């Protein structure tokens, strides 16, 4: 065999061996597929595992949310006005004559839904839709049409739910039933967000970044550049004529991981950012000196409990039926048999929720028992999926699919049925 032929054969063998080795590594690193899942997610700007702080410290949320003078923050973009669907606090029509909360008739049953993103998705992704006929079928609501208004939203935690209720009541708006689905944000968000910047637990999430000066503009700009570079790298892979090559995919995985690591590093800078070392009360609130992780967790649980008590008192004085539900979470031990899909997408070791939830939820459950003894219609939903083997959780935080929201609606309707005045 001539030398050029030998070299060509050796090259072919090397390429083939490299492809086989790369195939094994790629399948191990991205079992869901690079071209099918990971790269399209990155190309579209999806989370793709950008890091624990991505949801709180991404520059995009500064555009999506605006500071509200009483509620902390609200989404700037309001959904299309639909009083027969779910109304939201950022819709100007809600505050005008003709709104069901202002001019609703006796046949309208105004139902408020509050809490964090789980309550928001419950309201907008099948939960309210499933709850509507269940409420309408109750004898005391016979002949009335449930109309839903969302008082909470993504990232909301107590006492924002309390403030949202007061925001409605102080303007003379009507509400008949208030459903509060919360608990997770109260014990999880502070420990991964505000605590790093020494912001008080009572303040809204990411508060210092929302109100700080622009000293961090360089960091935010660099992070935005890296986010754009990550998208471009994924788009280059998807448009490459050799995109099916596992070796090419392995190169992209290495580039993507390096970019994500750089983004995480900037997340840490943003999370611990301090403006010239000055402790500003407006951006940080009352400081908890010499506190421990346990004392801060107890403080957050007490804030959650006291906020619910205040909601109950305001509702009782205003003729509103208040129902408080502790939301389920996949990290509560024994709360659900996880499907194979859930084990892949709903559980991760990269986040700290698996540590926070088992430690904090027993405190929430104990505080919930105290709420019940103090007259609050409280119900623990942590085991609502205990007999469900279907896939319900859709991410490694807390969110559920449409089936999960329908199951929640049935449990909520059952609880409301049993808790009559």
Image (cartoon, rainbow, N blue to C red):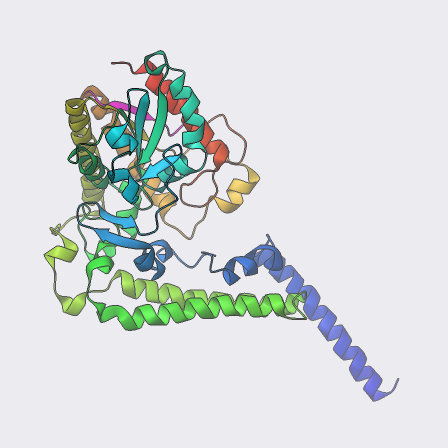
Near-viewer residue (132 or 413): 132
Q: Is residue 121 left or right of residue 257?
A: left
Q: Nearer the viewer, residue 409 or 382?
A: 409
384 vs 362, nearest the viewer: 384
Residue at coordinates 12% horizontally, 56% vertically from top-left?
282
Above/below status of 274 relative to 149: below
Q: Which residues are magenta?
A: 375-383
Quarter assignment of residue 40: bottom right
Q: Is residue 43 left or right of residue 334?
A: right
Is 379 within the magenta? yes
Residue placed farthest to the top in the image?
139
- Percent coordinates x, y for residue 121 in the rendering: 40, 39
Q: Position of residue 20 (x, y in %)?
A: 70, 64
Evaluate whether residue 329 shows in this view.
no
Residue 266 visible: yes
- Image quadrant occupied by the C terminus: top left
Please name the residue shown 34% across and 67% down the image: 266
| Outermost residue toward the bottom in this view | 3
Residue located at (24% from left, 39% from top): 95
**Which residue shows up at 61% across the image and 61% down it?**
25
On screen, residue 276 versus residue 32, left or right, reads: left
In which image quadrant can residue 240 be found?
bottom right
Q: Position of residue 115 (x, y in %)?
A: 30, 37
Q: Quadrant of residue 397?
A: top left
Q: Is residue 142 above or below residue 259?
A: above
The quarter of the rendered structure image containing the N terminus is bottom right
The vertical placement of 30 against 113, above or below, is below
Residue projecting furthest to the front: 97
């Amino acid at each position: 065999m001539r030398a050029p032929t030998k070299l060509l054969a050796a090259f072919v063998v090397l390429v083939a061996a490299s492809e086989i080795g790369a195939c094994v590594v790629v399948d191990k690193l991205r079992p869901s597929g690079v071209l099918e899942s990971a790269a399209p997610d990155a190309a579209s700007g999806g989370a793709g595992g950008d890091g624990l702080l991505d949801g709180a410290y991404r520059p995009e949320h500064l555009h999506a949310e605006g500071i509200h003078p009483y509620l902390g923050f609200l989404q700037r973009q309001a959904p299309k006005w639909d009083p027969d669907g779910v109304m939201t606090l950022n819709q100007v029509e809600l505050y005008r004559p003709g709104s069901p909360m202002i001019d609703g008739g006796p046949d309208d049953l105004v139902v408020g839904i509050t809490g964090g993103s789980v309550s928001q998705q419950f309201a907008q992704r099948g939960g309210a839709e499933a709850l509507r006929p269940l409420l309408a079928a109750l004898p005391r609501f016979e002949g009335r049409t449930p109309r839903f208004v969302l008082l909470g939203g993504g990232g909301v935690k107590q006492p924002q739910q309390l403030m949202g209720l007061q925001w409605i009541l102080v303007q003379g708006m009507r509400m008949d039933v208030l459903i509060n689905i919360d608990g997770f944000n109260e014990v999880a968000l502070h420990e991964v967000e505000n605590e790093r910047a020494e912001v008080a637990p009572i303040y809204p999430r990411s508060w210092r970044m929302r109100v700080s000066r622009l000293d961090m503009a360089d960091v935010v700009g660099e992070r935005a550049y890296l986010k754009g570079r990550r998208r471009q790298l994924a788009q280059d892979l998807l448009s490459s004529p050799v995109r099916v090559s596992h070796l090419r995919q392995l190169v992209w995985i290495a580039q993507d991981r390096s970019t994500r690591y750089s983004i995480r590093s900037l997340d840490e800078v943003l999370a611990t950012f301090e403006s010239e070392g000055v402790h500003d009360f407006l951006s940080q609130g009352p400081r908890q000196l010499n506190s421990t992780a346990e004392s801060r967790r107890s403080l957050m649980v007490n804030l959650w409990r006291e906020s619910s008590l205040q909601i109950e008192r305001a509702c009782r004085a205003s003729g509103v039926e208040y129902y408080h539900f502790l939301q389920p979470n996949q990290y509560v031990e024994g709360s659900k048999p996880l499907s194979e899909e859930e084990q892949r997408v709903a559980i991760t070791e990269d986040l700290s929720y698996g540590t926070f939830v088992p430690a904090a939820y027993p405190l929430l459950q104990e505080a919930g028992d105290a709420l019940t003894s103090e007259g609050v219609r409280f119900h623990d939903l942590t085991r609502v999926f205990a007999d469900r083997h279907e896939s319900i959780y859709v991410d490694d935080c807390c969110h559920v699919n449409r089936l999960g929201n329908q199951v929640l609606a049935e449990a909520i309707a059952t609880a409301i049925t049993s808790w009559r005045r």
